[in-house]
Structure formats: structure tokens, C-alpha cells
């Protein structure tokens, strides 16, 4: 018997996309923070700081979304999906207990 983790994989993918979208929506604030830190180094520092702040906002959002989506997917796997598969016959079933 092996776990299939369909909900975890789907939740992680959907959460990652949603988190990246959320992070992208908040890149303006990340870019502003990056620009203020980069201002010390002049115009090039502002440009690099703006880009770094925007990228970090997107990456942090995607990471947080993936983690949250995976955890939600684990719950869906455990409670609602036939999440186990027999290696001998290929049958898919719900496990009555995990452990």
C-alpha cells in the first residue's frame, strides 16, 4: 500500500499559483522597500533593490501558498479521497487509519 497524495499535490500547486499571484499583487510594496534600501547605493542600487524587493515578494507569496495548499490537501486526502493504492492489484481505497 502506498499513499497517492493527490490532494496534497493539487493543493500545493494551486496554493503556489495563488500565493504567487498574491505576492505579485503586493510587489509594489516590496519594490518600494527594496528601492528604499537600494537608495544608499544610488540609482543602480534603487533599480536593483526594486527588482529584488518585487522578486522576493513573489517568491515569499508562492512559498507560503504552496505550504498552506499542501496542508489543506493533506486534510482533503485524509478525510475525503481514496488516498491509498495497493501495489499488488492497483486497487485504490481509503485507509481507515494513518500511521
Image: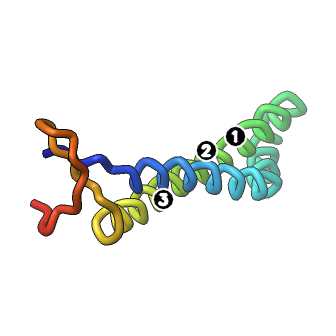
At label 2, counting other C-alpha atoms closer than 10 Å, the crowd grade (few under 14, some 14-19, many 20 or more) is some
The label on residue 69 is 3
How far is disc 3 from disc 1 in space, using C-alphas? 21 Å
Percent position (x, y) of residue 60? 58, 50
Residue matched to label 2: 59
Give the quadrant of residue 65.
bottom right
Quadrant where the C terminus is found in the figure: bottom left
Mark 1–mark 2 CB contact (< 8 Å): yes
Residue 72's place in the image compared with 54, above or below, is below
Q: Which of marks 3 and 1 is nearer the N terminus?
A: 1
> What secondary structure is found at the residue carrying circle 1?
helix
**Residue under pointer 1:** 55
Mark 3 vs mark 1: give the one in front. 3
Residue in the picture at 41% in, 60% down: 73
Residue in the picture at 14% in, 68% down: 96
Left or right: 77, with 59 as reference point: left
Amino acid at each position: 500500500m502506498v499513499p497517492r497524495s493527490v490532494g496534497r499535490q493539487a493543493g500545493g500547486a494551486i496554493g503556489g499559483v495563488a500565493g504567487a499571484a498574491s505576492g505579485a499583487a503586493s510587489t509594489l510594496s516590496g519594490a518600494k522597500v527594496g528601492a528604499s534600501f537600494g537608495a544608499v547605493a544610488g540609482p543602480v542600487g534603487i533599480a536593483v533593490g526594486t527588482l529584488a524587493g518585487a522578486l522576493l515578494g513573489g517568491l515569499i507569496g508562492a512559498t507560503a501558498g504552496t505550504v498552506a495548499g499542501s496542508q489543506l490537501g493533506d486534510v482533503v486526502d485524509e478525510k475525503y479521497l481514496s488516498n491509498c493504492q495497493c501495489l499488488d492489484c492497483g486497487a485504490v481505497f481509503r485507509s481507515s487509519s494513518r500511521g
